Image (cartoon, rainbow, N blue to C red):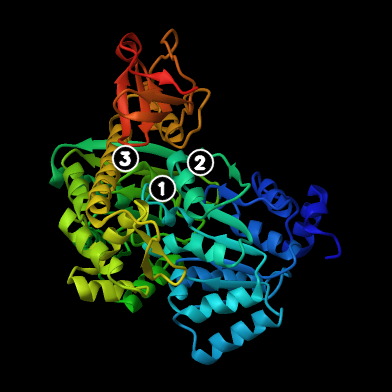
């Protein structure tokens, strides 16, 4: 295109969308994100699943001279996007991942070098191969896209350590324009995404989180057997297709078997299955050969099946971040769907147990730190694992915390090296353990917010939207509490701090006001996570003060 990106008008953006993608108009948020990128800003776009995030980078890539790198964590999702771009007229696309041959990989990078490619899709693990970075540095991409950007945040869900290197990768490429995309990111997660990616002169585009076509409901049970029987009966009667989420592999198989006995075409899906079996199960569900898929959270990322009529949770999710992402897979055709949580308070213990796994102690952190500092050359995680005798997960956890406290730097290729101005090992290990404790405090507090959703005596949609920093002018009228008339009357209740404003507590430090619950206020503190305080007590004792 003859025009410089900075001079492209919004009218021209929309015209390009019509010509190249066949879109008569752009959805809310898409145009804002594209316009910001064209003006040279980095952009974090937080938009609901199904709102057309891929169109943002397709159009921006077509309008900005130079290649576009797209980081995507799932091979199937990469292939879907490559095929989708092949049906458009925005440029050629290819995926380079573990499924391609050496010859195909070579051909892809040669096409990139010859300016024949507009889009190249990579998983973050591809940077384990130094050639990947070298080839991209030679190509000088103009746009770097991170899909499923919440994977970079330990405070969110579905954290993936390989995403942590992307900030270094971006800097090593001369910091092309950066576009981070995610469907779910609470304010704390957004901040961490921006920081880890070293985003500059950035704009955050947040499109409304509300999915008004999804009915929200929670049913509480005291006995596990009673809960499971009710779930089986509900699924058997419900309009299909649908998704059932459970916490463990064993539960997915047991529920799927019970549904089959009720003549429901159900299939299980979990990470313990062979890759081929998982792919077969997913394909059966996507092609409507299976009516219901019963899965752990291993299922769902990148899944776009418009006609899912329900998402039912057998077990409470570990956070509202996860829950929102999971229920967002229902009703993408904008027809009515429902999200139903079968809640048993004992399930919280399962989540607490799962959340406590993977922790390291101070001695293990010191082991990793000592090994890193003793080497003059960068070390791969596998080499650290071999020298310390620790498991791969513990090495990854220790490295992440040591990066946070400044003792270790992660190179774009995923190798670890001691920082030039590193603190001593003992101090760093203690600081890393403190960082770990802050993290687990936050994890526990997120679970408490999820429990709050299950037990709230107020509009559930308002509670959910408040968590993501949005307000609702009035009760939604489309959840079980609204239907039952269980809505808190906030009229006359003092609300001394504005929503999303910053406050400070004498012990817990700074935090953000997330929501009011009658005479209670919920704050997300940087150090300790979510806390619920009595408004009158907090104001009388000056426990909360506005941050000037």
Q: Is residue 467 left or right of residue 19?
A: left
Picture quadrant where residue 106 is located: bottom right
Q: Secondary structure at mark 1?
A: helix
Compare residues 120 and 325 and report the one nearer the observer: 120
Q: Are marks 2 and 1 in contact (CB under 8 Å)?
A: yes
Query: CA–CA distance between discs 2 and 3?
Result: 21 Å
Answer few, some or many: residues within 10 Å of disc 1's Cα (few below 14, many 20 plus, some between 14 and 19): many
In the rendered view, would you say 536 is above or below 22?
A: above
- Between disc 2 and disc 3, whose residue precedes? 2
440 to 504, vertically: above or below: below
Q: Is residue 309 visible?
A: yes
Q: Position of residue 408 (x, y in %)?
A: 35, 60
**Chain-order first, disc 2 or disc 1:** 2
Question: In this view of the protein, which residue sits in the foreground, 260 or 14?
Answer: 14
* The image quarter in which residue 452 lies: top left
- Between the residue at mark 2 and the residue at mark 1, the CA separation in whole angstroms equals 10 Å
The structure residue drawn at horizontal position 20% and vertical position 42%, both measured from the top left corner, is 348
Label 3 secondary element: helix
Numbered disc in front, either 2 or 3: 3
Q: In the image, residue 487 lies at what x, y percent? A: 38, 20
Q: Nearer the viewer, residue 231 or 322?
A: 322
Residue at 43% x, 62% y is: 163
Q: Are marks 2 and 3 in contact (CB under 8 Å)?
A: no
Residue 183: tell me if it is visible: no
> In the structure shown, which secondary structural element does the residue marked by tag 2 occupy?
loop
Q: Which residue is mark 3?
A: 446
The x and y percentages for residue 146 are: 53, 60
For label 1, the residue is 327
Name the foreground residue: 545 vs 31. 545
Q: Label 2, on which residue?
A: 211
């Amino acid at each position: 295109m003859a025009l410089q990106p900075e001079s492209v008008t919004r009218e021209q953006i929309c015209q390009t969308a019509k010509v190249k993608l066949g879109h008569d108009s752009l959805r809310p948020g898409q145009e804002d994100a594209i316009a910001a990128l064209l003006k040279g800003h980095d952009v974090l776009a937080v938009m609901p699943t199904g709102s057309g995030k891929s169109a943002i980078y397709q159009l921006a890539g077509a309008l900005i001279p130079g290649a576009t790198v797209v980081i995507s964590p799932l091979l199937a999702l990469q292939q879907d996007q490559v095929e989708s771009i092949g049906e458009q007229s925005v440029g050629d696309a290819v995926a380079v991942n573990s499924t391609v041959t050496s010859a195909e990989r070579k051909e892809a990078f040669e096409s990139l070098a010859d300016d024949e490619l507009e889009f190249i899709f990579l998983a973050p693990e591809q940077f384990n191969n130094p050639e990947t970075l070298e080839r991209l540095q030679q190509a000088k991409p103009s746009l770097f896209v991170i899909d499923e950007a919440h994977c970079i945040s330990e405070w969110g869900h579905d954290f993936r350590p390989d995403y942590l290197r992307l900030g270094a990768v971006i800097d090593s490429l001369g910091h092309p324009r950066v576009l981070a995309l995610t469907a779910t990111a609470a304010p704390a997660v957004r901040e961490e995404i921006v920081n880890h990616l070293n985003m500059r002169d950035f704009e955050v585009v947040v499109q409304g989180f509300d999915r008004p076509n999804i009915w929200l409901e929670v049913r509480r049970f005291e006995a596990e057997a009673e809960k499971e029987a009710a779930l089986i009966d509900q699924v058997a009667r419900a309009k299909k297709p649908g998704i059932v989420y459970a916490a463990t592999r064993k539960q997915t198989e047991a529920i799927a078997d019970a549904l089959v006995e009720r003549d429901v075409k159900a299939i299980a899906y979990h990470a313990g299955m062979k890759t081929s079996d998982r792919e077969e199960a997913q394909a059966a569900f996507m092609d409507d050969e299976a009516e219901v898929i019963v899965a752990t959270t291993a299922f769902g990322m990148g899944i776009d099946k418009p006609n899912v009529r329900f998402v039912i949770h057998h077990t409470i999710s570990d956070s509202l971040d996860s829950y929102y992402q999971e229920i967002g897979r229902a009703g993408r055709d904008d027809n009515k769907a429902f999200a139903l949580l079968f809640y048993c308070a004992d399930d919280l213990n399962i989540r607490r147990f799962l959340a406590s796994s993977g922790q390291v102690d101070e001695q293990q952190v010191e082991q990793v730190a000592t090994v890193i500092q003793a080497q003059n050359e960068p070390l791969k995680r596998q080499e650290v694992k071999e020298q310390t005798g620790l498991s791969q997960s513990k090495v990854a956890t220790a490295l992440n915390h040591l990066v946070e406290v400044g003792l270790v730097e992660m190179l774009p290729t995923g190798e670890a090296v001691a920082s030039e101005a590193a603190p001593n090992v003992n101090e760093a290990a203690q600081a890393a353990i403190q960082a770990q404790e802050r993290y687990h405090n936050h994890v526990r507090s997120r679970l408490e917010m999820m429990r709050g959703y299950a037990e709230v005596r107020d509009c559930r949609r308002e509670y959910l939207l408040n968590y993501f920093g949005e307000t609702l002018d009035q009760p939604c009228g489309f959840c079980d509490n609204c239907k039952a008339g269980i809505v808190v009357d906030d009229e006359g209740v003092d609300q001394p701090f504005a929503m999303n404003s910053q406050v400070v507590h004498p012990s817990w430090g700074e935090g953000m006001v997330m929501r009011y619950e009658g005479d209670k206020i919920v704050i997300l503190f940087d150090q300790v996570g979510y806390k619920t305080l009595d408004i009158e007590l907090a104001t009388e004792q000056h426990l909360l003060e506005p941050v000037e």
